[in-house]
Amino acid sequence: DDQLEAADTSTTLPDDWDDQLEAAEEAQDTAQLLEMVTTCTTNGGNDEWTDATESSLDALFRIVKQGKTNDKMGVMIQTVYNALQAWQEEEAIVEVAVACWGTLAHQVATRDDKDESLDLPSSLDLSLLVTIMESFPDESTIQEQACLAVEGLALAHTPWKTALQALESTLKPQLQAAQNERINNERNKAYPGRAAQALDISLS
């Protein structure tokens, strides 16, 4: 049954998708937005779903930036990660997904109860961030957001920090390149250093 359901989801984009999305965002229905992003993820790589995926993640990101995440942060982080993994070759989707992921991580980092009540996923393959930074060297915004995501993830959850530290040999050169060449905004060139500091590594 699960296989049949998965097969059924990778079909035609519903005509009323935008209406559903608008209604879910207006109602601040986080569960519905997460379900819609998950549907987009099952259609990863299907060109028909590209715009729908970007707009769904944009809507979710707007809710996240308002702090309307409550106790769903663990599920949100996993959902956004899944979308990023499925659509990692699509620049516009990567940009919003990494920004959303990083913002969620920073929000988790500020909570005192993060380890007890949020049910944070510990099995994320964080080498995805290295892949993203390698794949979009000329996209300054993606480089910035990836650095902020590294910082947020490292500060939010010890298993994530440990996993990122284990990637130092591949992650550190990406952070150095972001600092020295890829990030254009002078103020934002501090982001790679902040990421390194959160991981207790040096970029010098």
Image (cartoon, rainbow, N blue to C red):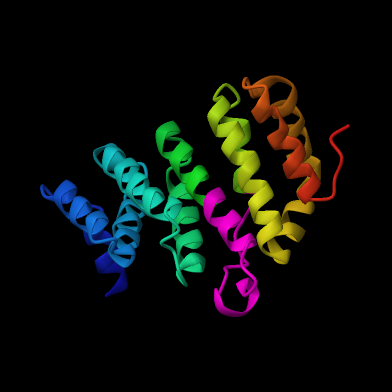
Q: Is residue 13 visible?
A: no
Q: Is residue 58 highlighted in magenta?
A: no
Residue 198 horizontal/vertical position (percent) = 76, 50
Which span of residues is magenta-colored?
A: 102-127
User: 143 or 131: nearer the eye?
Assistant: 143
User: 3 or 158: nearer the eye?
Assistant: 158
Residue at x-position 34% and y-position 55%: 37
Residue 155 occupies quadrant: bottom right
Q: Left or right: where does residue 18 sit relative to residue 89?
A: left
Q: Residue furthest left?
A: 15
Q: Quadrant of the C terminus?
A: top right
Query: From what the image shows, is residue 29 above or below residue 198?
Result: below
Q: Left or right: where does residue 55 sit relative to residue 199?
A: left
Residue 167 horizontal/vertical position (percent) = 76, 48
Q: Quadrant of the N terminus?
A: bottom left
Q: Left or right: where does residue 174 sit relative to residue 89?
A: right
Q: Is residue 149 visible?
A: yes
Residue at x-position 54% and y-position 25%: 139
Q: Left or right: where does residue 76 sit relative to residue 108?
A: left
User: 135 or 33: nearer the eye?
Assistant: 33
Q: Is residue 105 highlighted in magenta?
A: yes
Residue 160 horizontal/vertical position (percent) = 68, 60
Residue 185 horizontal/vertical position (percent) = 62, 22
User: 82 or 11: nearer the eye?
Assistant: 82
Residue 129 occupies quadrant: top right
Residue at x-position 50% and y-position 60%: 77
Residue at x-position 45% and y-position 69%: 72
